Image: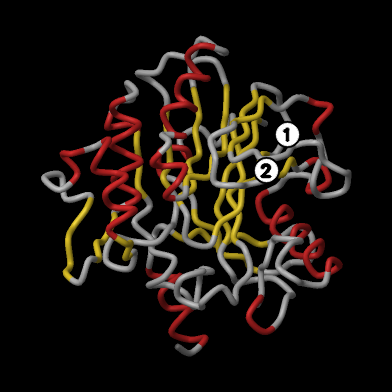
Amino acid sequence: MSQTEINNIINSDTRFNIFESSYNGAYVPIVRSRLLSKYDDRILHGFSTRLGGVSTEHLASMNLSFSRGDDSKKVMENHRIFAGSLGYDPERTVFSDQVHKTYIRIVTEEDAGKGIIKESDIKETDGLITDEKKLPLMTFYADCVPLLFYAPDNNVIASVHSGWKGTLAQIGAKTVDIFNNEYNSDISKLICFIGPSICYDCYEVSSDVADEFLKIHPDYIDKKIIRYTGNDKYHLNLQDACRDILMDAGMNSDNIEISGLCTSCNHEILFSHRKTNGLRGNLAAVIMLR
């Protein structure tokens, strides 16, 4: 796909927003949520693409991970560009440490900068949640499902990584429980953006994985969340599975938005582990209270 074709896709798809970075004037495409954007006066949020950065080769160009073999100076430059586009201080960003489990860390001011400019004690953590301002919460992706939450009634945010293991273990529902039990948020008003991730048609899984889901959710065949494709293989719709889990946890379906952008189908714009056999950088989701 040519750069012109890529630009045409981005410019014609309303899910992409083009920002000019205050850091270096670069034009950076960022995926944003229609629902969360209603609260731009209270929160900042966005999901990166692979465009607009300085990394090269299979990491080109907006790789935001220090763990993919990239030059750390280039990664830091990418963070400055991305943060400059959205308008937050990159040196206050708090990183997750994703291991496909369900631990969610309550983040406070003392965590500012952990993972990006400070050594971090945030370990084996797939979700971050806070009610404190000016703390950008960042999680990382290259096919798995980003979940960005906002409770408008009492100003609480979360950024959560949900791969198939986390989805199976219902990390989304566990996040909702923390909003309810730790922050007393009104779950009927809680908002979640299910960001760009691998789609139903691109995500083939073995019968072992499908069976694990069907043990807990025997209705997933009827709901078309799991589809048998033959030869002991299935397709799994992680986005719809996450939505189903959030609704079972008490969320209002009108407050759940699915991006619909597939990382694998759009691998020229978004990093995809599956599409590139692991030769890729990392995308990131960020959310912050203003």
Which quadrant of the view contains residue 196? bottom left
Q: CA distance from mark 2 to mark 1?
A: 13 Å
Residue 172 in picture, x, y percent from top left: 44, 33
Q: Is residue 99 above or below residue 251?
A: below
Q: Quadrant of the C terminus?
A: top right
Residue 31 in picture, x, y percent from top left: 50, 56
Q: Is residue 152 above or below residue 86?
A: above
Mark number displayed over residue 96:
2
Mark 1 crowd level (few <14, some 14–19, many ≥20, 10 Å Cα): many
Mark 2 crowd level (few <14, some 14–19, many ≥20, 10 Å Cα): many
Please tell me which residue is depicted at 34% across the width and 50% down the height of the picture. 238
Using residue 261 as the reference point, say whether residue 44 is left or right of it: right
The amino acid type of the residue labelled 2 equals Ser
| 57 or 90: nearer the viewer | 57
Q: Is residue 259 above or below residue 228?
A: above
Residues tagged 2 and 1 counted as in contact (Cβ below 8 A): no
Residue 12 in picture, x, y percent from top left: 38, 70
Mark number displayed over residue 24:
none
Which quadrant of the view contains residue 126? top right
Mark number displayed over residue 135:
1
Which quadrant of the view contains residue 64? bottom right
Please tell me which residue is depicted at 38% across the width and 64% down the height of the picture. 262
